[in-house]
Amino acid sequence: MSAIGVIVAVLAAIAGLGVMDSYHEVPEGHLGVYWFGGAMLERVTEPGFHFKLPFVERVAHVQYTLQTDTVRDIPCGTSGGVLIYFDKIEVVNVLDKKFVYKTIKQFGVDYDKTWIFDKIHHEINQFCSSHSLQEVYIEQFEKLDEALASSLQQQCNEWETGIKIVAIRVTKPRIPDSVRKNYEAVEESKTQLMVAEQTQRVRRAEEETKRVQAKIRAEMEAETAIINARKEAEVSLIESEKIANQSKIRREMEIFEKEAEKTMALIENEISVARQRAAADSTFYSLTTEAEALSKKLTPEYLKYTLYTSLANNTKIFFGEKIPQIFLDFLGEKHRGDVMLN
């Protein structure tokens, strides 16, 4: 191969390498930041395919979605001089897209080393140095994650890093075996005490439950007795009212019968009086009619006829000048002269 051919091949290889170096991809959830000759450019690219100047520009991918940084093997000494280790502390954080350029320019692509890893070491040592082993391992441990998150977030905000601390998970620290055994013995004693206390509470709860049940049972029995007494009283009252009503009904029936008998007697009396009145009226009418008939019948001629008939039928005959005065009185003044003349 001639020298020209070699040069052409080299140039072609360099051109191919340049094309390969200039073409790059920014993955989803990341932004592309660029440097030219060591100086950071203001250019920031979104996820996708992009080009850069080959060999002279450098690109880095900065994640702006949630990420978890794990800090391991953190030594710290307590205020009592005991050295303990935190095997793992996880920090969930996210970088705001608007702060990517500023944060990377000030603190580099490994900004999380400054604000997460180094800060966790610092804050853990500050915490341990101001607390005893009892406080770090037991009493204040449940508050440690919140204290770390609050402290880191405060410092990130002061420096306007755009980093948001979402959560911190702290594992139990590793303590010396001798101390751990003491704690285990204490915990075992506490556990036994708690079991005993829990047993006592359960017994007291059972006794209280029995007492409450007995009280409820007694109240129910008392209420049942009251209800039964009320029912019996109501039944007795109903029976009394029933008997009273029956007596009242019998009295009313007797009164009604008496009134009916009285009414019947009054009606019978009225009927008897009416009958007697009718009989009297009939008798009076008969007598009146007979009297009227007799008054019409007693004419002078009839009387004279009756007298003569009576005299004729009488077996006694009176002779002489004087006739018994009785007959003359009976005839009256008018006829008395006629008799005398005859």
Image (cartoon, rainbow, N blue to C red):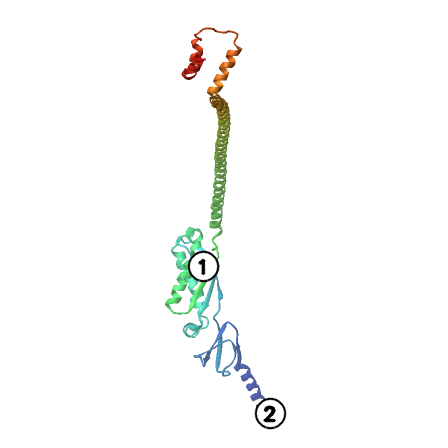
Q: Label 1, secondary structure: give it.
A: strand
| Rendered location of residue 83, percent (x, y) | 44, 55
Do the residues under discs 1 and 2 have CB atoms within 8 angstroms? no
In the drawing, does residue 29 fall left or right of residue 329? right
Q: Is residue 133 above or below residue 34?
A: above
| Rendered location of residue 187, percent (x, y) | 48, 46
Which comes before the other along the chain, label 1 or label 2? 2
* Residue depicted at 44% across the width and 52% down the height: 137
Q: Label 2, secondary structure: give it.
A: helix
Q: Which residue position is annotated with label 2?
A: 5
* Residue depicted at 49% across the width and 14% down the height: 307
Toward the viewer: 80 or 197? 197
Q: Amino acid at mark 2?
A: Gly
Q: Quadrant of residue 16?
A: bottom right
| Rendered location of residue 294, percent (x, y) | 48, 21
| Rendered location of residue 225, percent (x, y) | 49, 31
Q: Which residue position is annotated with label 1?
A: 75
Residue situated furthest front in the rendering: 341
The N terminus appears in which quarter of the rendering? Answer: bottom right
